[in-house]
Image: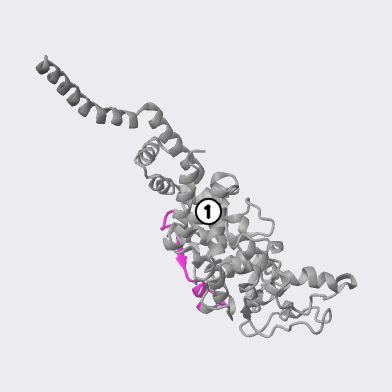
Amino acid sequence: MNTLLSNKLSLNFYRNKFLLPITIFFFLLSPTSLATSLDQAKRIHDRLAASPPSEEVLNSMAEKIANGDPIAAAMEAMENKGFYNIFLKNYVTPWTNKDQEVFRPLNDYTATVIGIIRDDIPFTEILTADIVYVGAKTSNNYLHTDNYHYEELESSDVDLGDEQNLIAVKQSELPNSQLLASHTAGVLTTRAAGEAFLFAGTNRAMWESIAENHLCKEMGELNDVSRTPDRVRQDVTRSPGGDSTIFLNSCVGCHAGMDPLIQAFAYYEWDQDLERVIYTDGQVQEKYLINNTTFPHGYVTKDDGWSNYWREGKNIALGWRGPNSSGFGVKSFGEEIASSHAFSTCQVKKAFKEICFREPANPDERNEVDRIANIFETNNYSMKRVFAEVASYCMGE
């Protein structure tokens, strides 16, 4: 009996030893598990590529997810033409116009952001580099005076993810450019940005656009009445409606920080007649000096020297980390903005909203934004990695 019992126990031991891994294997590949991976893969592809995947791509992505690598699955989805031509085009276009409309033609601002993401160039360079992306195969050459080059590129429906179709060139080397390399600052000095944010006005619209699109801050959120108003221009009344307390308790909170920052654009203007950005090196544009009798004792702009007064006060929370708190021109200004931690978290927040269809709404999601922002900064500011991380986080929804 003892021998028989021993044999039965041995048989059960070996049966369990071999059956357990097989059971686990089939559990991992069970119809429910496989279906979940397929659903998640399709969801990621639909959101990033704005189109359904092929069966081959779907299975490949699902396998990556089942093997615990949803980041690789998202990267595979981003190889699709739709990621560049649809997702990114719609993602970036609202940044390029005051009304934040999606349905606008492709332009040099949008194309440059698409190209920088495609080529995995550090995303900080959208605000600093001597770079613009142009079509390689269009009959309309790039011109500073119209957008036909990009409209043709879009209407021809070429794959913007193909390096043979969309190429990087230097802004300073474009035909008839007025800019030296030291004057350029990525999308900030593109034709589209000039048309939208430098036209008429006082160039303050450019700062509002930068704050909203690259720091994710409305002007009201930046308002800090504790800052010194010594750089507020002459065109701002100190007694709105005859009441100086309105200026001291409200207006100064934005102007004290905004005016010294946007002085970086003092030599830039949008010429409505020529339909192009004008750069006058060493000569302050008239718009910086208008309405000088509104408050004659206000600041008179003499050059393009900028200062960041928001490095102190409540806006220190934006995480300023640039090499200098002041400088000359838009390139060093762009470095100040792009170096901030707010720039990093802003990119993640926008990606989260676009892919997850909502704002980060609770502590866990806000912690996730911080986690991905840190990954963004430690991975050479790769926006592809941001999109992949966000898509991975939301793939179960």
The answer to whether 42 appears left or right of 179 in the picture is: left
12 in the magenta segment: no
Q: Nearer the viewer, residue 256 or 1?
A: 1
Task: Give the magenta part as a residue range.
Answer: 161-181
Residue with the most extreme front position: 2
Can residue 304 be seen from the camera position used here? yes
Q: Pick whichever, 344 or 24, lies toward us.
A: 24
Q: Nearer the viewer, residue 53 or 377?
A: 377
Task: State left or right for residue 190 relative to residue 226.
Answer: left
Question: Which residue is painted at 40% across and 28% down in the image?
Answer: 32
Q: Quadrant of the rendered structure where residue 296 is?
A: bottom right
Q: Position of residue 343 (x, y in %)?
A: 55, 63
Quadrant in which residue 378 is drawn? bottom left
Residue 97 x/y as whole percent: 65, 59
Where is residue 184 shown, x and y percent of the image?
54, 74
Type of amino acid at the residue the image marks with label 1? Val
Near-viewer residue (37 or 26): 26
Vertically, is 285 above or below 110?
Answer: below
The answer to whether residue 137 of the structure is visible from this angle is: no
Residue on which disc 1 sits: 369
Which residue appears at 79% of the width and 77% of the height? 235
Where residue 273 sits: x, y (%)? 70, 71
